[in-house]
Amino acid sequence: MDAILFYVFAALALAGALLVIGQRNPIYSAFSLIVVFCSLSGIYGLLGSPFIATLQIVVYAGAIMVLFLFVLMLLNVKKEEPHQVTSPWLKASALVLCLLLVFQAGTVLLRAPTWPASVPFDASTRSMAHQLFSPHFLYAFEATSVLILAALVGAVALAKKEL
Amino acid sequence: MPDAAPLVWWQELGAKAAIALVVFGANFLTFVNMTWVERRVLAFMQFRLGPNRVGPFGLLQPWADAIKLLFKEEVMPAAASKGAYLAAPVVAITAAFMALAVIPYGPPFPLFGRMWQIQVADLGVGILYIFAITSLGVYGVVMAGWSANNKWGLLGSLRSSAQMFSYELSLGLSWVGLILTAGSFRINDIIANQAGWFWNWNVFMQPLAFLVYFIAACAEVARTPFDLPEGESELVAGFHTEYSSMSFGLMQIAEYVNMITVSVLAANLFLGGWNSGIPGLPSEAPWGFVWFFAKVGLVLFVFIWLRGTLPRFRYDQLMHFGWKVLIPMAVLSIVVTAAKEVVFPRVSVFR
């Protein structure tokens, strides 16, 4: 049952991801990205962490994508016209990069000695909180929040020069 | 009551399906009658009579409206983005009904020798799940307004996405205090935390959080002082300007179901759920339902009352209020609750 659900979510995520880059219309790309986030959340749920699954939806599908859509609609981004390929090297370099990516992915997959089916990790909310606020991660956790705050202040300072 | 033998998987599935059907049906019937109640109550507040022709007291008016909507012609704007236009009402209503899955309706009751509760899934992260699903609901509105290729619709969606985004923060922050005192995200645990005398209810323990929750919920479901996404005097009908027939009907259902959801949540999270509030009065099965539905009805009535009383916000006032008043209030409430939890851990001040 879990395996079937995993393949359903994985297929949805892959199809959504392909649609994100395949769409000419940026708004539809954004909608496809929401589908990707929701399928990923389903996979997190299957892995036994409903907490991370819901956070994935709250943060990415809920908050960030609403902001994306807001900006896209506010700027009224038009459909992209297909570009005229000017350089003859464009297609060749794309092919080379593609092969490089396949090579890299292949090496990683072949070199990986064992593929852990499931890592023994208690993903409940309580243990997550204990982990995050343990001496191991506390510094990194707090530093990240300060970093985000700095980015926020920076964005406001850039947008409003005469504040 | 000792639990009987564990359910086989198909029994469990059947039971869950039956509960889901009950929740769906109850919400749908509440929606149908709420449209009538709202029109009648608003009418009385304005010294009118309201719909009183179809059936006794006009009770059959919603059904007549439903039949009318079903038989109306569906008109789609020629320049609409077809896929998003058709998907929008589906997204809106799916999100609205998905949120119902983790809400408990009333106390556990015995039936066929075991205990049942009208709750589809008692999720450990219940309150977070609701937060996640309500944040998805806005996409129905956004898609509807954008895809119809109508200026009013687009403006309505823009307002809607900005409004939801701003007020979702305060909505989530207003729940943090409850999670702190109950020590759990599970809605049943938060209700159990409010047992005993009525001053244990979160509305009395954390009045500021309740105020923030109620205002933010009002904004989330775009009810009157916050119904800017469909402000009819400026935007015709906002995001659903171009919707007709049953796709318009679906939008309306989604809106009302959202309103019922936040009312049920207010009753469960802040008004003590099915607890009577007085230790002598029973909170168990038959009586618990009475207290619970009375509280839900009260909150729903306040929503209508607000609509009959308050004028609409201006857009800049809305943003100012959301970011500079409501969020600081929510943070203050969290700080006070957290300090109280440190000084008197797990013990209510009055108990």
Image: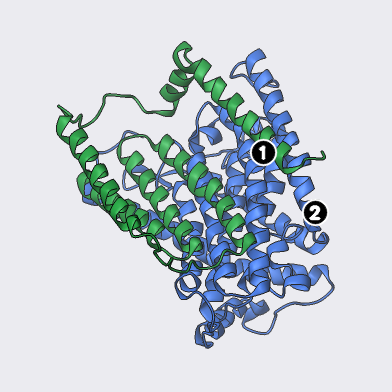
Chain colours: A green, B blue
Residue B312 in the image: x percent, y percent?
A: 80, 61
Residue at mark 1 shares a chain with residue at mark 2:
no
Residue B129 in the image: x percent, y percent?
A: 48, 43
Q: Residue furthest top?
A: A135
Please indicate, yes or no, whether residue B257 appears anywhere in the rendered image: yes
Residue at horizontal 32%, vertical 33%? Answer: B2
Residue B1 in the image: x percent, y percent?
A: 36, 34
Chain of the residue that carries numbered disc 1 in the rendered image: A
- Binning the other alpha carbons within 10 Å of mark 1 as few (below 14), some (14 to 19) or many (20 upward) gives few
Name the residue that disc number 1 marks.
A155
Residue A144 in the image: x percent, y percent?
A: 54, 25
Chain of the residue that carries numbered disc 2 in the rendered image: B
Please indicate, yes or no, whether residue B299 appears anywhere in the rendered image: no
Q: Is residue A116 left or right of residue A126?
A: left
- Number of numbered discs visible in the structure rendering: 2
Q: Is residue B76 left or right of residue A156?
A: left
- Binning the other alpha carbons within 10 Å of mark 2 as few (below 14), some (14 to 19) or many (20 upward) gives few
Q: Nearer the viewer, residue B112 or A123?
A: A123
Name the residue that disc number 2 marks.
B316
* Quadrant occupied by the C terminus of chain A: top right
Q: Quadrant of residue A72?
A: bottom right
Give above or below for B67 relative to B274.
below
